[in-house]
Amino acid sequence: MNGLPEALAGLRSAHRTPAGFDAFWRDTRTAESHPLDPVFTETPTALTAATVHDVSFAGARGHRIAAWLIVPRHAAAGDPAARPPVPCVVQFLGYGEGRGAPLDWLLWPAVGLATLVVDTRGQGGANLRPGDTPDPVGQIHPQIPGFVTRGLLDPAEYYYRDAYVDAVRAVDTALAHRAVDPDRIAVSGCSQGGLLSLAAAALHDRVAAALVESPFLCDVTAPAQFPDRQPYRELLRFCQFHPQHAERALETLAFFDGVALAERAVCPALFSLGLRDQVCSPASVAATYHHYAGPKQISVWPFAGHAEPNGYQRRAEVEFLTRVLDTRTGIHAVPSGAAPVS
């Protein structure tokens, strides 16, 4: 479906960005200036067309973050000084997912791009994909089991403060590898991964393109709007059991809201949403899209729910990056009914 349906067209957010938003993130970036110390260890696999590196880098507070770097073999073979670098898609993950196995992430290498698949600290196991990155930060406030309410009463201690810093430093890690073209780095993700993609696009000036699918934690203005579904259920339960902290929780969330991030991101972006999504509401995604500051387009899937497999969307993303990053792939057309890419 091309464009937003009339009910969502022009929808704006009621979100109000806190006055200290930009200062908070500027100070956070300054405080997180420790060495990146990226380590790329080539890992033997059965793949004949790609090379895999087990990656580790220093994320927020110096904590080590695990990732996979998968590079088309033609970009990893021979004399490093003679081979041209390739674009790279930094892939962020949905709630609870870990990086899993390299075989899970072959789309981008198959069309000639490298990909850096980044663990989300402390998470892993959803969709049968384990993670390899712990979260050493202790519990300092009341919270509901999970990650969404961890440190929720203080922006400086909130879980997603560190997750956003990890995302930004993941882009730095991609920039650090000789096979990656530093001028052609994209970020991508669905749900929580879409939120982290927005964060990286807003907070890192070297991101050239963003793929933002059904982003989580967007347009969060009142507890009454939280759906009783994971991971919003954690926020709903927090406000239920700690009503005296509900207002303070919303004040913290305002520093992490995807709408505020969208207002600060300027690279070209492809959004997507499913009109049957009962987790990240179509209205919240549409509002975030409308607030996005850079060139943008959106794919709308009338019968899709949240984070459902969507080969048409993957193909639209390939076409989008082919155009925006000026790559060459074997795919030349989006099937009838999919989003335009021009």
Image (spheres, rainbow, N blue to C red):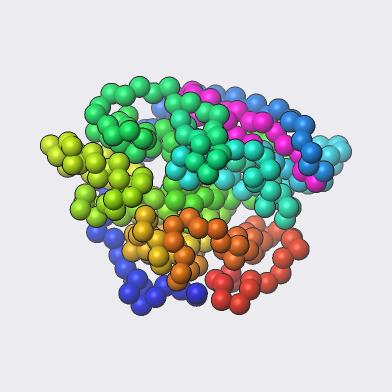
What percent of the width, then of the height, locates residue 37? 59, 24
Looking at this view, name the residue that lies furthest to the right: 78
Residue 291 vs residue 336: left or right? left
Numbered circles on residues, count? 0
Residue 326 vs residue 338: left or right? right
Residue beneath the point at 43% across and 22% down: 136
Residue beneath the point at 52% across and 61% down: 270
- The image shows residue 316, relative to residue 24, as above or below, that is below
What percent of the width, then of the height, locates residue 300? 47, 69
- The image shows residue 63, relative to residue 83, as above or below, that is above
Residue 173 can be seen, yes or no: no
Looking at this view, name the residue that lies furthest to the left: 244
Residue beneath the point at 84% across and 39% down: 77
Residue extent of the magenta highlight: 49-68
What percent of the width, then of the height, locates residue 145? 33, 33
Residue 246 vs residue 327: left or right? left
Quarter of the image for the C terminus: give it: bottom right
Residue 152 within the segment the image draws in magenta: no
User: Which image quadrant is residue 70 in?
Assistant: top right
